Image: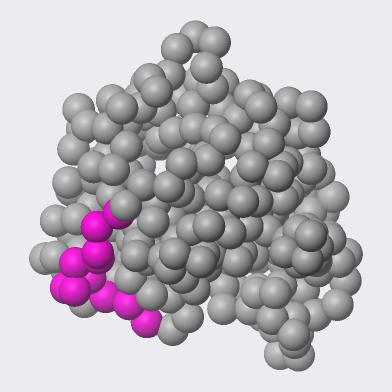
Amino acid sequence: MTTTATTLPPLVCGVDDGYARPLRTLMQSIAAAHRSAVTELRLIVLDQQISKANRSAILRDADRIGLRTELRPAPLTDPRYPVSDWVSGAVYLRLAIPEVIPDERRVLYLDADTMVLGDLRPLLRQSLDGRPIGAVRDPQNPVIGRGIQLPGWEELGVPYGRDYFNSGVMLIDLDRCGELGIFERSRQFLSEHPDKVRFWDQDALNWAVVDNWYRLERRWNTFAMSPQAEQPGFVHYAEADSPLAQLLEDERTAALVHFAGPDKPWQEDYPAGILRDSYHRFHDGVSRGERR
């Protein structure tokens, strides 16, 4: 379905079997945040060989909560792309969006480890002023050269101090991205400079966009910082550019919470608190639906 003046752009997520359950929790949060408006939304899932059982569960949940959902097969990740730590090759699925979704002009990409707490419709209608991508500056690595992102930035000709966005939530103008070759440049970067990648697709996209991105309000991608800040030995290295006190305050007004990093709220040892409780309200909703 092509986006028209009266049709909102679709939400897009990409998952393999490892993130099928968090996706279903995200879907629960989307429905709860929109109630009577959920029928205005659409979700397209980039399916990287998830099991038949997980596909059935996703579609069953979608039908139960009234969220129009479509699964589309997505290509396997190029084995040359680096992976490490807690991620699999599925982290690069968002780079397949133009290939898998050629029939849309604009999409809102969401990582499966996000939780929706506010109405997404204002974001879906947000103007990008001609820029290819709208995103939020990464709170833990906000600028090039003062973080651990994009190692080798000097050799790549990236200026010190340039803003760096987080790719977990992106409003994408696919037409404009096509004109500028954003996704092609990202894939080229990953193939040619795997040694200069720390944060996977995010480094590649930041390099490819060349700072031509729209700065979204922080409420659209609020990191779950309070659980991290409570961990022994926690240090916020980006204090000069994004003060921790402000990041913690942002949690109060978040429309979208992002559980970035290796510690996830569905893990048993995730720190207790408001964000964990909020997440489990939706996560437990998935379990209740399975018992019906």
Could you say where residue 222 lies in the image, as x and y percent from the top left? 67, 52
The answer to if 78 sits in the magenta stretch is yes
- In the image, is 250 to the left or to the right of 152? right
The answer to if 217 sits in the magenta stretch is no
* Residue located 34% across and 65% down the image: 49
Q: Quadrant of the N terminus?
A: top left
Q: Quadrant of the C terminus?
A: bottom right
Considering depth in this image, is 219 or 40 the residue closer to the camera?
A: 40
Could you say where residue 61 lies in the image, as x and y percent from the top left? 65, 51
In this view, 36 is above or below 157: above
Q: Where does the magenta region start and end? A: 74-84
* Residue located 73% across and 26% down the image: 37
In this view, 243 is above or below 8: below
Question: Residue 152: which quarter of the image?
Answer: bottom left
Q: Is residue 259 visible from the viewing direction of this image?
A: yes
In this view, 37 is above or below 272: above
Report the predominant secondary structure element of the magenta stretch: loop
Considering depth in this image, is 275 or 279 the residue closer to the camera?
A: 279
